[in-house]
Image (spheres, rainbow, N blue to C red):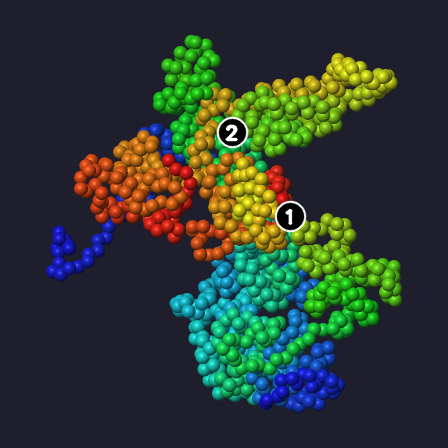
Amino acid sequence: MTRAPDVTREQRGQTKRMSVRLQCPGYPEDTLRSLADRLPCRDTQLETLLQLMGQPDQYSYPSIFIYGHRATGKSHVVLSVMKDLELPHASVDCVECVSSGLLFHQVLSAFFGPDAAALLPRCPSLSDFVRLYKQMSSNSPATQTRYIILDRAERLRDMDFSLLPALLRLQELVSDNVTVILLSEIVWEKFRPNTGCFEPLLFHFPDYSKAELVQILSWDHHPSYTPELYASYINILLGVFFSVCRDLRELRHLAVLNFSKFCEPLEKGEAKESDIHKLWKNIEPHLQRAMQTVYLREVSSVQWEQQQMDEEAATTLRVLSAHAHIELPYYSKFLLIAAYLASFNPARTDRRFFLKSHGKIRKTNFLKKHEKTSNHLLGPKPFPLDRMMAIFYSVVDSRVAPTASIFSQISSLVTLQLLSQVGHDDQLDSPKYKCSVSLDFILAISRTVGFDVVKYLYDFL
Amino acid sequence: MSEIPTSSVSKGCFVFKSASKKRKRHVGVGGYLVDDSDDNASDRFKICQKLWETVQMNTEVIQDQLNKKVLDSLAEFIKKHGLGRSSDNWRQRASEIPTAALMLGVNVPDHAMTFRSLCNLLQDSVTPFVVSVHAKECAAVKFLIQKVLEQLMEIGVSVDEEQEDDTALPQRTQCTISALCQWYKTVTKKSTKVSPQRKENSTNSDLPQSLPVVVIFKDFEAFNPQVLQDFILICSRYTQELPFIFIFGIATSPSAIQHRLPHSVSSLLCIEVFHSLSCTQHLASVFEKLILNSEFPFKLSSRVIQVLVGIFLYHDFSVQNFVKGLQFSMLEHFNSQPLSVLCCQKQEALLSAKTLSKKNVERIRHLPSFMRYVETQEPQEQVRLLTDDEHVKGVCHTLLKNLHKYHKNYYPILQCLHSLTSSLPKFPLGKHIRELHVSCIEKNLWETEEYDSALQLLRILAKDELVAALRKCAEILKSAKRMQNVLQQLDDFIGRLEALQSVSSEDSSGNGIVSGKIEYQRTDLFQLQKTLLEKESRRTRRMNPFEVLRSQVIEFIDSLVREYLTPAELQPLSEVCYYSSSGVLRQRLNVTPRTSIQAALSHPFYYLQNESLKTNSGTISSAAPDLCIVYKLHLECGRLINLYDWLEAYVTVMSAAEDQDTNSEEGGKYDSLKHARFIQAVSEMEFLGFVKSTKQKTDHVARLTWGGC
């Protein structure tokens, strides 16, 4: 039952396929072989996992913590093992569990059927769960190790503080052959509660290397083309995308999206499968464009496909961030400008900008040391409502009555998230705001109302 | 017993049911108008309501027309994704959720109507499973999921197990998407079973299997990003079983999506952008339908239009609010102007003109526009108009007819002039027709500088431009029945302009030779000026036929403008139709809470209407409420106010009213009642936000406003 935690390192040197067969008694061998075939480049992990699990009827380690970056095959490996070996397991995505009750419910119904889960009281506590689990397992004791797989386990931290420590030693609490497998993208150090807890077995899934990625991606080659062609396509694709993206899922998505473009010269008969260079020349700029658009979701995948169909659409297609312009009512624009000025100018400079006879104030003498760095680098600062209104009345060209609609415009700017409210204490008396728009945006806005905002910005003096 | 029902041995509580239930019967709006001494108040109310109904109907029709395109394309998008799902299985693998980003503009009040019609459209034509959620209701993921489930399954779903509502469902449904998944499977199975029985469904029997579930996020920006991210993550786990489609209602710009969602989440979406019509275009069509329409009898004066359009452009961009403003001015007009009984369709107006009451005839005599009309008449006629009621009614009849005729002629000509001038550089008469309309009904258009410059620009139009513009005018005039002779003249001009083709080309070559000779002379400044002047004079002397014709056309247009686009105020009886009190409108629609508070505090008579409160400015009356006295006293102070001094001043004011001798022993003191009233008044001031307690100085409060007295 107790195994050395650094079992991973020991096993790495051995020949993998052999060891899988040799070291996992109790599981049907051909299933293991097919499993190993279906999980390329994860042989070491698979093997270690199986070793940790031991034979089906043996007690396993109470809790295993598996971590690694996104799309490194954590849940895929674990779930494939569970499914193929037909082990009793409950798989729960913690993102779904808005309350711990849902988690208990899912676990119980996976192990003992929905009737058992229905016995849970309305607002089940941890002890309710443990009690019910014990009751159920005494009726039907585990012949094989039961596994609870918790995906996105980092969400557990936001739930009840006792939940995570309890789950880690659930085996002890329910005195049943149960193992909790936590899957997360975050390292264990970020989980450990202050009060300490049972330390799970840590198990890292490393990133796929470039060669491994090629190997995996080449798997889903198109039936009407040779695997070699597809492999060379994948090589080209990775040449472009590997520096920005190692997410297997994302790469696969991109590979599917762009493959038809890659094959275009072949279909037209302009090139043969052996003309890799020609094909590369054809696809490379296309992939570069894909990196700037479809990868960032500036263009949706459907639009991208349509664009490949007809070249005319390519020029007309506008990306998401291209429509940055927002049409605002006249006074809202000035309110936003006033908010921007209040956010990025030190309050002491208001006299200089908005008073008629301000006199000359030299920038260097006038300022304290820390103010000499650009305010635009430091980001927006909070300002009280009064200051913004004072600036507003001074920048707007006509006399404006302080009407209710002016004030309601401020709150609608907040809902549009162009302004953001800071601090929650003194909301009625003196609310404070921050302006959350960029310089480019405010320049565009002030151009439409004929206001030279740069003249009023301290940073550009 | 019945006489003394409350007699009892012990103390008790007795309940009486109110016997006056009948009196509480709902009084219709008409009921308030009956006791009004003015006759036909209820008539006016009826007219007003009828008009309002047409306004409402028209605005809805306009909204539907304008939104049709974007809504249709949205429905198309959803159909495409809902039905084509099985074919492209790779997208399922990537578990992308089709998402429509609907750009609606910042006029948030108008969105509700768009979403309502979108929901109806989708439910009618695409899928019954449409959910719309508001950010306000979804502070956490579970509430969002609950909303979705409730709306789809049409049952109550408990989120918090702590809530005790055992009466609810026999088997309680869990608030999870997987529960929804189960439900969806059963529902779709049911509908596939049902469909063969029904004839109409059997034609598209493959449809129910892939009916998408549409979730509409009405105000995307207001959602908590974390909630959205979690919801999308959860939904993407279920895309295989539950064909979700999202619609984001976005007020700002599509980049808002990228600001709210990280790449890991936005990579789960397949976003397409849809743009709805801009609010200014919407306003323009509402304006055209409701205000630039001779069929609609109620009119707004130029100032009122300026107020309403100003609120739209400066404050909210909301067409809904604009229509509300129109409604308010209608109500105000029909309420305050007894003669508005004549403000209805032509036939009815003529009828009610005959049956005007004596009072109303008198009111007509006092109308400024009618008085102006009387002054232009012969002395004999003047006498009759001022004495003979029946004669006035007859004249009224013809004047009303003229007014209607004026409107019928006015709008086509206005449109013509707009179409002519809207293509001119710098838009001397305004870019939008509403600006032109405002300047036309305000004053004599032809006396303005802008009109002159517009005509100047028209005089130098090239031939093809002029012909195109005139053709547009002819197109507009075709629909106006009364304008047939004008149309004929216009057609005539167009014909003559086109006939000029051959002639003009010869003429221009002749000019070229003349100018060529002049070119080779010594360039002396004086000489140059002279030759230029000469050239100028020669050109005016010898116009080619096109130029002659062009100036004729311009003259013609000018004459049309002078004839038909006269200011509305000059029309007799215009007050009947035109609502002109822009001040009231501004006061009501563009409220200033602070000024009204200040007015109430410094002039309590303004609101309380109590004679004893009338004071001349500068003095502080002790009869005023304590708050007003304290307010006036605090105006005299600086930034920090000593509470003791303030109290002294207050007591002085109060005791001055009681006519007590200040030199008596009580002078320095004050009773606890006054003290308490003062404290209460100060705390009310604090509540209103005029003062604030401060720690800078003991026994002082800080003023939060500037100025005083």
Please name the residue shown 76% across and 61% down the image: A258
Q: Is residue A373 left or right of residue A393?
A: right
User: Residue B632: x and y, percent?
Assistant: 34, 39
Q: Is residue A316 left or right of residue B38?
A: right
The residue labelled by disc 2 is B302
Q: Chain of mark 1?
A: A
* SS for dot 2: helix
Residue A440's label in the rendered image is 1
B101 is higher (above) or lower (below) than B47: below
- Amino acid beneath label 1: Asp
User: Which one is in front, B631 or B488?
Assistant: B631
User: Residue A342: x and y, percent?
Assistant: 54, 47
Q: Is residue B405 visible from the viewing direction of this image?
A: no
Please name the residue shown 28% across and 38% down the image: B624
B194 is higher (above) or lower (below) than A192: above
User: Residue B665: x and y, percent?
Assistant: 18, 42
